[in-house]
Image (cartoon, rainbow, N blue to C red):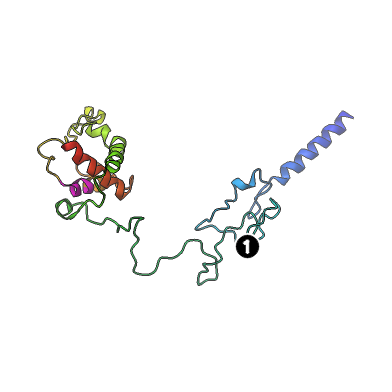
Amino acid sequence: MNIVKSVIVCLGASVVLAACSAGGNNQGTEYAPNMYHSVAYEPYSQITDPGAGRWLTSIEYEDGHAEFFNSNTLNVSTMGVFMNMRTPPANTVPRNKNGWLPYRIPKDSLELAAKRLKNPVDSSAQVIAQGKVLYQTYCQHCHGAKGEGDGKVSEKYAGVANLKGDAYKNITEGHIFHVITNGKGLMWAHGSQMSAEERWMIAKYVKVLQK
C-alpha cells in the first residue's frame, strides 16, 4: 500500500513539474503573473491582444481591455503596429522640461563656455540650498566642504582644485558648468550623473563658497 502511495505522489509531482515547464511563447505556470506582465506602457515590448490576462482578474478597464494589454491604440505605425514610443518629427531637437536645448559645446571649448554661458537658474535661497546638497553629494569628497581642495580624495590624489585659490576665484558659472559637464584634468565628466539644472545649481553654490 505504501508503494502505491509513493507511486501516486511521484506521478502527481511529475505532472505538476511538467505543467511548470516553459518553452517558446509558452511561459508555463506563473507565480504572481503581475510581476511578469507589466500593465504599464512598454516602449519596445507590447501586448496587443486586448483580452490577454482576462483569466487573472475580473477588473474591466474603461476601454474593455484585460489585465496584460499595454499597447497604445491611438498611435499606429506605418506598418500597422501599435506604437507606445512616438517617433520624433524629422529635424527636431529634444528639449528638457525647462525648454533647454542639449548642451553641445565641445570639451575643448572651455574658454567659449566661460564667456558665453549664463546661468539660467536664479539665486534664490532654495536654489542655493539645493546646490549645497548636490555639492555635498558630488563634489565635497574631492574639493572639501568649503571648496578648499581638502576632501578625503585629495589625501590620496594630489592636484584637486582649491576653488578658493587665486586661479579659480574669478571663474564664471559657465566655466564651472562646463567643467562639471565634460570634466577637466583629474576631474572626470559628471554630465551623465546629473541634469543640466543640477549642474547649474552647483555652479551657483560654488560661487557662494568662493565669496
- Position of 138 relative to 177 (above/below): above
| Prevailing SS of the magenta stretch | helix
Whether residue 83 can be seen here: yes
Task: Pinpoint residue 194: horizontal percent, then vertical percent.
Answer: 33, 45
Look at the image and give the residue range highlighted in magenta.
172-178
- In the visual, does 23 lie left or right of 101? right
Task: Pinpoint residue 44: horizontal percent, then vertical percent.
Answer: 50, 58
- In the visual, does 184 lie left or right of 191? left
Q: Badge 1 local density, few (<14 within 10 Å), some, or many (20+)?
A: few
What number of labels is visible?
Answer: 1
Helix, strand or loop status at disc 1 = loop
Quarter location, residue 152: top left
Task: Pinpoint residue 133: horizontal percent, then vertical percent.
Answer: 31, 37
**Residue at image mark 1:** 63
Query: Residue at 24% of width from left, 45% of height from top?
Result: 123
Amino acid at circle 1: Asp
Quarter location, residue 88: bottom left
- Identify which residue, 3 or 145, lies in the foreground: 145
| Viewport quadrant of the N terminus | top right
Query: Residue at 55% of width from left, 71% of height from top?
Result: 80
Was residue 191 drawn as part of the magenta stretch in this picture?
A: no
